[in-house]
Image: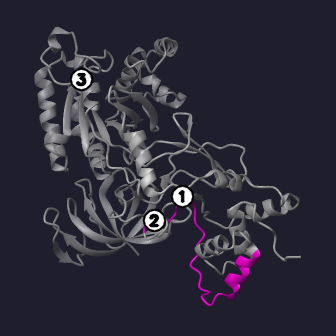
Amino acid sequence: MSRHRNFRNRDFSEAIDYVNDVLNNSKSRNEIIDALKKYDNDVEKAVDLLLNSRDSHSDSKPIQIGSGATNYDCKDEKKIEVEITKRQPSQAASQKLNAEKNLEGQESPLAKSTKKNTSKSLEEIKEVYKQQRLTNKLHLNLIIAGHVDAGKSTIIGHLLSLLGNVSQKIMHKNENEAKKAGKASFMYAWILDVTEEERKRGVTIDVGQYRFETEKRIVNVLDAPGHRDFIPNMITGATKADFALLVIDATSGEFESGFESGGQTQEHILLLRSLGVHQIVIVINKMDNVNYSQERFNDIVLKLKKFLKQVGFKEESIQTVPCSGIHGDNLVKHSDIAAFKWFKGSTLINVIDNFQALPRQIDKPFRMSVSDCYRGQTTGIFVSDILIEDETRTEAFAGDVVSLNVQLLDGSEIFIGNVLCDISCPCKVSDKFEARVVTFGTLEVPLLKGSSILLYSVCMMSEMAFITKLCSQVDKTRNEIIKKNPRLIDKNKAAIIRIKTERPVCLETFENSKEFGRFVFRSEHQTLGTGIVEKIL
């Protein structure tokens, strides 16, 4: 009888853990995967091969899901499976194996699901993508941002209502509850702000996700919080957006407090541009509070456009719409108020209909950042369902906002900020990288060797890090080195620096993935600058 258990029809990840335990962590995960694939999940042959291997070095590190960098040197990108890597060796795996000794003859859910999976070539994937995403309505991801109380949720809530996405029953319920709470004007905002805390405080706290269709587009809406305390939540939404609505309160003194007096408007603009948003709509809200003044509208737009261009937005990518979110003026159709007849431009819905999606990297290895988790009673490790708007799908593409039903060994294996990846092209881990950064005017204390910062990106949620080297100061416009090994980096400067994180994190070079290669760095309450990953060390 074989000294090893039979895993041929069992969970592939269990076999990996079993071989790893037998070899006492002396081989890397990639070596184990290759050996198991070679012998069709036969652990006995895999162990013998690895024991007899002359190359006995090991580069395995205990990591969480996606706590590493994408390796784009993978030779086989056709077959896509999901790998879940863990921060620490899981005892749950060995406990589950011991508890199931009498079930060896049964087939695992992963084995069944793998049999159903028919691999497609890259050309076939591109053709399916073209048919499903480019032939009919274009799919877009929209982030709505702006200073607290600018009316972001009200605008989107009213827009959803006008487009027929909200039932009369829900609207009647929201209207009655808002009146009882003494907040009648919040009836549309409460379509998006559904939690008790959001309604009590009158502000959006998390990034809400909603969907609507126009004549030409299918739009996923990411309603971001405007309050300073929830800026990290806003960053989560901005990393996924194709374009942005920047909502401004036209009320006298309110625009100034949000834009000129340490408000969140400037910080939101900097974050949007830093995280890859190139198309933006300036939505001047609450025009009814200023008697629909064209002069007030022009004054606000002039100041905002100047700042937008300074941070990198192009004139042709900036649109402007004056509106009243509570009354619905210029959202779907032009206002019929006489004092507002001066506006002859496109309504908000027409502007949205003409925006373009960012290029989707469907030819790259699979990567998916986790932005939310819902716990359930699950076993094994495999993806059982792909859901888009609660509908089960057979595939999803880069840029889609999806939910995955992932079966786990226990309920504590996946966290926000983790990354799911292609098992044939797994993530690497790294706690050191070289980056090109630009500091903002908010930097009060210059960056020095040893300075501590907090990193945020599509897969880094408030990661503590330290600057280990100031390599050079760079000219922001000409991209030329001004000074090597500078002593410090002051505000509004560009530089190449080296960073070390407290723990391994998921990274991509900007060259390989613009989405994963961008990051912003902050102090506890202020965004200090932005950067792109140039080298993973």
Marks 2 and 3, how far apart at CA: 42 Å
The residue under label 3 is which amino acid type? Thr
Does the magenta portion include 359? no
If you read the primary sequence from the N terminus, does the residue marked by circle 1 or circle 3 appear first?
1
Marks 1 and 3, how far apart at CA: 42 Å
Main SS category, magenta section: loop
Q: Residues within 10 Å of mark 1 (few under 14, many from 20)?
A: some
| Quarter of the image that includes the C terminus | bottom left
Which mark, by number, is residue 369? none
Residue at 49%, 16% (x, y): give it.
167
On the question of residue 45 being in view, the answer is: yes
**Which residue lies under the disc numbered 2?**
70
The residue under label 2 is which amino acid type? Thr
Query: In the image shown, does 254 or 170 lie closer to the viewer?
Result: 170
Residue at 52%, 45% (x, y): give it.
395
Q: Is residue 57 left or right of residue 476?
A: right
If you read the primary sequence from the N terminus, does the residue marked by circle 2 or circle 3 appear first?
2
Which residues are drawn in magenta?
44-72
**Which residue lies under the disc numbered 3?**
347
Q: How far across and how far down the image is residue 25, in percent? A: 67, 77
Helix, strand or loop status at disc 1: loop
**Which residue lies under the disc numbered 1?**
80
Helix, strand or loop status at disc 3: loop
In the displayed structure, would residue 518 be above or below residue 428? above
Query: In the image shown, does 160 or 103 lie closer to the viewer?
Result: 103
